[in-house]
Image (tube, rainbow, N blue to C red):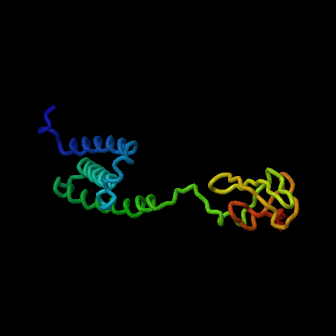
Amino acid sequence: MDFHTWSIEQWYLSLLIILAICMVFYLFFGDMVECVGEGIPFFNPAVILAFLTFYTAIGWVLETFTALNSISIAIISVIAAIILDILLYYFVLIPLKSAEVSMAYTEESLGGQVGKVIVPVPVDGYGEVVIETVNGIISKRAASYDLVEIPYDAKVLVIEVKESTVFVREYSPIF
């Protein structure tokens, strides 16, 4: 294959295919190179790959379907790729990076939750309740807030949490 005889469309398309392969590799192995762009935000490998992909895709489309000269197409492609890359960075990558993906919960967040008794709660002892949250099902040691016995399978309302023990009372919905 003689690379000197390739048309500009072939160069754009070849680069686009190579960049698509790089994107697939980045999808699988991106966590290993993610630390490279920590200090300089636009040196993030995802941003660089996105810029090059936008540039080659726009360049190929314009070369194939318009009659503009190659210099104009290169300038238009660079400007459009910069704009799309900035939009991608600020509206997709930054929100994804700052999104909380924690499965942790705080004991204070359990207050006001409704749970179900799985081990009966005696008057002066401990039982066990399960509470369904967005993080999953949490099982906690429980004591009666009103010092009354709470039977198995009763719905309870968490009043307060002290030292990993939830203090509950039987839950009766208003409606």
Please name the residue shown 39% across and 64% down the image. Answer: 90
Q: Nearer the viewer, residue 13 or 154?
A: 154
Question: How many marks are shown on the rendered structure?
Answer: 0
Q: Residue 31's x, y, as percent? A: 39, 48
Q: Splitting the image into 4 quarters, where does residue 132 fall?
A: bottom right
Q: Residue 2's x, y, as percent? A: 13, 34
Does residue 30 lie above or below 73 as drawn?
above
Q: Residue 16's x, y, as percent? A: 28, 44
Please name the residue shown 71% across and 55% down the image. Answer: 140
- Residue found at the very far left of the displayed protein: 4
Quarter of the image that includes the N terminus: top left
Q: Is residue 14 left or right of residue 109?
A: left
Q: Is residue 166 left or right of residue 2?
A: right
Q: Nearer the viewer, residue 53 or 23?
A: 23
Does residue 163 lie above or below 45 as drawn?
below
Q: Is residue 71 left or right of residue 164?
A: left
Quarter of the image that includes the C terminus: bottom right
Please name the residue shown 84% across and 67% down the image. Answer: 146
Q: Residue 99's x, y, as percent? A: 49, 60
